[in-house]
Structure formats: structure tokens, C-alpha cells
């Protein structure tokens, strides 16, 4: 059953990775997760913004960044401008404000395409995990470590796990699409 546990663990990690990736897609609302991949050169060390500043959401479409080291505000602002989040920061010398614009219909549709693409990539990863697990089971059968009946039972369990994981991915994708398309 070790093969089954490994496959289940990998599939759970795939779902966690999908959730993490989708949290960085902005849906017209302020979300601190969009800054997770933005690194600032903090005295020679690439540092995530959340490790060097306080990030708050005072309004649904506004993100405020108050740096603990005021001398680093300009570096934070430059890092945000260079990133791919598509929001221009405004720096008043004390805090940086990121105003999330209302999404246009076209931008919403682009985001939905990105969500579907990420979902499909996750499904491909899950199917790859299933294939690897099935190959391990066949190898164990060939080496006479398990019986033919055990092989069939484990392969059926792996298929059921795969189906359940893909259903979970579909639900996550559907929920994210609804969030993006809601005006």
C-alpha cells in the first residue's frame, strides 16, 4: 500500500500547488497573495515583501504596504513595478498603495483562460502520478511481491483516487471562474 500513500501525497501536493497558483491571480479584489512572488533586493538579499513590510487591506480594492525600514520603500516600489502583477504602485513616502482596478470583461475572460490552463496542467500532473503508481504496481507484480488480485485492487484504488482528485480540481477551477466573472 506504500505506492498508494505516495500517490495520494503527490496528488494532494498538486492540489495545494494549484490553490497557491490561483491565489496569485487577481480577481478585481485586493489580495496580498499577488505579492508572494515579488522579491525586493533587501541589502543584497532577494526578500519577499511580506517578510519586510506589513501588508493590509483597508478597502476591498486597496492594498497598503508599510515597510518596516522606510529607506526600502523605493526598492519595494521598483520591485512591484518590475513584477508581472500589472498594478502601478503609488508611494507617498510612508506607505505604498496598490489600487486594484475593476476588471474589464476582456480581462476577466483572459483570467478564466489562465485558470483553465492551470487546471488542465494540474490534471495532467495527477494523471502522470497515476501512471507512475501503476508502473510501480506492475513492477511489484512482475517481481512477485504482490498477487494479481492485489494488483487489480490497488490499480482500482489508484484510479478512484485519480478520479476524486480530478473532481476536486474541477470544483476549484469552477469556484475561481465564478469569483473572476462576478461583477
Image (tube, rainbow, N blue to C red):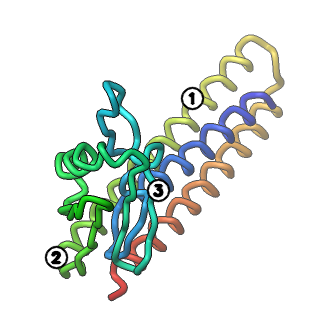
Mark nearest the camera among 2 and 1 is 2
**In-front residue for pair 141/157:** 157
The residue drawn where x is 32% and y is 61% is 95
The C terminus is located in which quarter? bottom left
Depth order, front residue of 88/24:
88
What distance separates the C-alpha of mark 3 from that of mark 1?
Answer: 43 Å
On residue 54, the disc is 3
Look at mark 1 in the image and give the residue it sits on: 132
- Dot 3 falls on a residue whose secondary structure is strand
Along the polypeptide, which appears first: circle 2 or circle 1? Answer: 2
Q: Secondary structure at mark 1?
A: helix
Residue 137 seen: yes
**Which of 79 and 1 lies nearest the eye of the viewer?**
79
**Cα distance, mark 3 to mark 2?**
33 Å
**Residue 10 left/right relative to 153:** left
Confirm whether residue 87 shows in the render: no
Residue 154 coordinates in the image, percent (x, y) = 76, 37
Please name the residue that numbered disc 2 is placed on: 106
Q: Look at the numbered discs 2 and 1 and tell me whether their residues touch, using CB distance below 8 Å.
A: no
Circle 2 SS class: helix
The image quarter containing residue 155 is top right
- Mark on residue 24? none
Name the spot of residue 62 as percent of width and height, x first: 34, 74
Image check: 6 left or right of 182? Answer: right
Q: Which of the 4 image quarters holds residue 109?
A: bottom left
| Mark 3 touches mark 2? (CB < 8 Å) | no
Q: CA distance from mark 2 to mark 1?
A: 39 Å
**Residue in view at x 44 percent, y 71 percent:** 57
Q: Quadrant of the N terminus?
A: top right
* Mark 3 vs mark 1: in front: 3
Amino acid at each position: 500500500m506504500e505506492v498508494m500513500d505516495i500517490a495520494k501525497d503527490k496528488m494532494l501536493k498538486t492540489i495545494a500547488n494549484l490553490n497557491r497558483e490561483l491565489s496569485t491571480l487577481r480577481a478585481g479584489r485586493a489580495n496580498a497573495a499577488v505579492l508572494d512572488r515579488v522579491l525586493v533586493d533587501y541589502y543584497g538579499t532577494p526578500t519577499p515583501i511580506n517578510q519586510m513590510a506589513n501588508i493590509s487591506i483597508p478597502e476591498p480594492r486597496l492594498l497598503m504596504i508599510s515597510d518596516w525600514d522606510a529607506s526600502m520603500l523605493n526598492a519595494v516600489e521598483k520591485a512591484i513595478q518590475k513584477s508581472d502583477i500589472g498594478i502601478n504602485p503609488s508611494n507617498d513616502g510612508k506607505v505604498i498603495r496598490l489600487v486594484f482596478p475593476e476588471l474589464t470583461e476582456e480581462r476577466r475572460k483572459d483570467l478564466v483562460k489562465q485558470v483553465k490552463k492551470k487546471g488542465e496542467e494540474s490534471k495532467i500532473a495527477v494523471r502522470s502520478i497515476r501512471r507512475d503508481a501503476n508502473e510501480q504496481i506492475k513492477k511489484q507484480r512482475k517481481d512477485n511481491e504482490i498477487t494479481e488480485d492485489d494488483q487489480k485492487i490497488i490499480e482500482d484504488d489508484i484510479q478512484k483516487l485519480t478520479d476524486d482528485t480530478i473532481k476536486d480540481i474541477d470544483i476549484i477551477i469552477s469556484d475561481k471562474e465564478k469569483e473572476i466573472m462576478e461583477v
